[in-house]
């Protein structure tokens, strides 16, 4: 019997699962593998947040069900965070919703606000979940190109009028994954005007908003002059607070869209474990001094890897934020061939650009989630790989 739906069967195996399987096999065969593939910060969750979780674990009342929309402490902390960081005021009861990570929230928002057959504007290259979540919701995607000549920032003129008229919603992602592209508030104002013109729900995936370098500060879409009922912004504590496994995030903005999302969630989950929510609330509202230290670590890693790749003859975009470098494939190989051969011959894992869409071909993504010594070693192996003639014969 076939116990797989058409939607599930149409989704290719998750790339990082395949990479992790091959990584495990190579390690078992004695290879020293350096994983610059998946974007999971390796830095520890700050101790004061962990201590808060331990404290909340001692309260037996926290072992009960959470309210469906999340506990008031977390929602109020998100509102406080937005006012502190972006001077944006939110109604914590109506304009904030707790998520089990922003990935879950994006996946559930689509069937909450769109119908099968509706059209959804998504970035190319872009986070693969935008496409796979659309497939599961039976929504048709309209990819819009992020071009190198525009530093991978969307030019709204690249979206044909007929495509914009077809769409019901659009998603943006800055700082970007995989490109690390960053934008100004002026860009978000153009996005807001575009959404108004074409009557779109405008969604922003802001997972990397607090990982920024030097004087750059990532804006919030909610800072733009726009009807808030047209906006949903997703945030996550996974990257900025190094809380990936905690699975805690939030959605803010349109009351109507969040109500619809909450209907989906209340029928499928009962929000996140209360001690995690309360520790996350403490993270957002408590001591933020570690953030500068962590961002300095990521910036130093970025500079080390960027400079090393440049010396090896590999072109890369120098980012103002995120934990990625977006690089050009240096050989006459597809991005998939380059990634596979690099792994097999050197033990270095990178992500082929083709995993992020058709426009990602010719590029590869490097994650900065390893220490400086390992990044330097990885860069050395990549440089040696490029100079080794045999790699051209292994296609």
Image: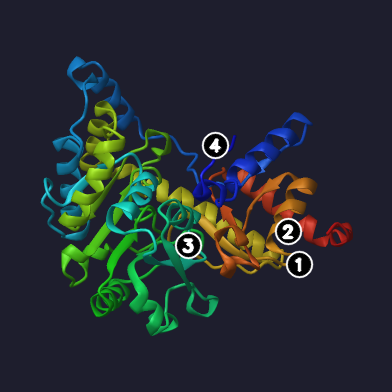
337 left or right of 187?
right
Distance between the Cα atoms at labels 2 and 1? 8 Å
Quadrant holding the N terminus = top right
Looking at the image, is 62 positioned above or below residue 124? above
- Secondary structure under the numbered disc 3 in the rendered image: loop
Instruction: Residue 320: tell me if it is visible.
Output: no
**Between marks 4 and 3, how big is the CA–CA gap?**
39 Å
**Residue placed under numbered mark 3 in the picture:** 180
Residue that label 1 marks: 331
Quadrant of residue 222 in the image?
bottom left
Disc assigned to residue 3: 4
- Gap in angstroms between the C-alphas marked 4 and 1: 42 Å
Crowding at dot 2, Cα within 10 Å, few <14 / some 14-19 / many 20+, comes out as many
Q: Residue furthest front?
A: 1
Q: Pick whichever of labels 2 and 4 is earlier in the sequence.
A: 4
In the image, is 357 to the left or to the right of 222? right
């Amino acid at each position: 019997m076939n116990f797989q739906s058409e939607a599930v069967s149409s989704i290719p195996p998750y790339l990082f699962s395949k990479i992790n399987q091959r990584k495990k096999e190579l390690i078992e065969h004695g290879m020293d593998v350096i994983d610059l593939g998946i974007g999971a910060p390796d830095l520890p969750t700050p101790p004061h947040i962990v201590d808060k979780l331990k404290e909340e674990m001692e309260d037996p009342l926290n072992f009960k069900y959470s309210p469906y929309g999340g506990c008031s402490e977390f929602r109020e902390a998100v509102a406080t965070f937005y006012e502190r960081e972006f001077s944006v005021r939110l109604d914590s009861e109506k304009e904030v919703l707790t998520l089990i990570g922003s990935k879950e929230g994006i996946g559930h928002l689509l069937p909450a606000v769109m119908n099968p057959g509706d059209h959804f504007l998504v970035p190319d290259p872009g986070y693969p979940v935008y496409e796979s979540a659309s497939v599961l919701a039976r929504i048709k995607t309209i990819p819009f190109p992020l071009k190198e000549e525009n530093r991978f920032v969307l030019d709204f003129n690249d979206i044909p009028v007929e495509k914009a008229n077809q769409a019901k919603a659009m998603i943006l992602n800055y700082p970007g994954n995989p490109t690390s592209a960053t934008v100004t508030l002026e860009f978000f104002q153009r996005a807001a005007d575009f959404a108004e013109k074409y009557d779109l729900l405008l969604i922003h995936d802001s997972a990397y908003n607090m990982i920024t370098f030097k004087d750059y500060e990532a804006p919030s879409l909610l800072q733009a002059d726009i009807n808030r009922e047209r906006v949903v912004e997703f945030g996550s504590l996974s990257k900025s607070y190094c809380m990936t496994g905690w699975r805690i995030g939030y959605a803010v903005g349109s009351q109507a869209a969040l109500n619809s999302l909450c209907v989906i969630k209340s029928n499928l989950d009962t929000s996140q474990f209360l001690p995690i929510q309360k520790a996350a609330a403490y993270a957002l509202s408590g001591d933020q001094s570690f953030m500068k230290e962590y961002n300095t670590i990521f910036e130093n890693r970025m500079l080390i890897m960027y400079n090393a790749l440049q010396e090896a003859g590999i072109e890369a975009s120098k980012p103002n934020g995120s934990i990625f470098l977006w690089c050009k494939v240096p050989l006459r190989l597809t991005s998939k061939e380059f990634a596979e051969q690099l792994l097999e011959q050197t033990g270095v894992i990178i992500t082929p650009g083709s995993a992020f869409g058709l426009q990602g071909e010719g590029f590869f993504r490097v994650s900065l989630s390893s220490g400086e010594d390992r990044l330097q070693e990885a860069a050395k192996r990549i440089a040696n790989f490029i100079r080794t003639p045999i790699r051209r014969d292994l296609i």
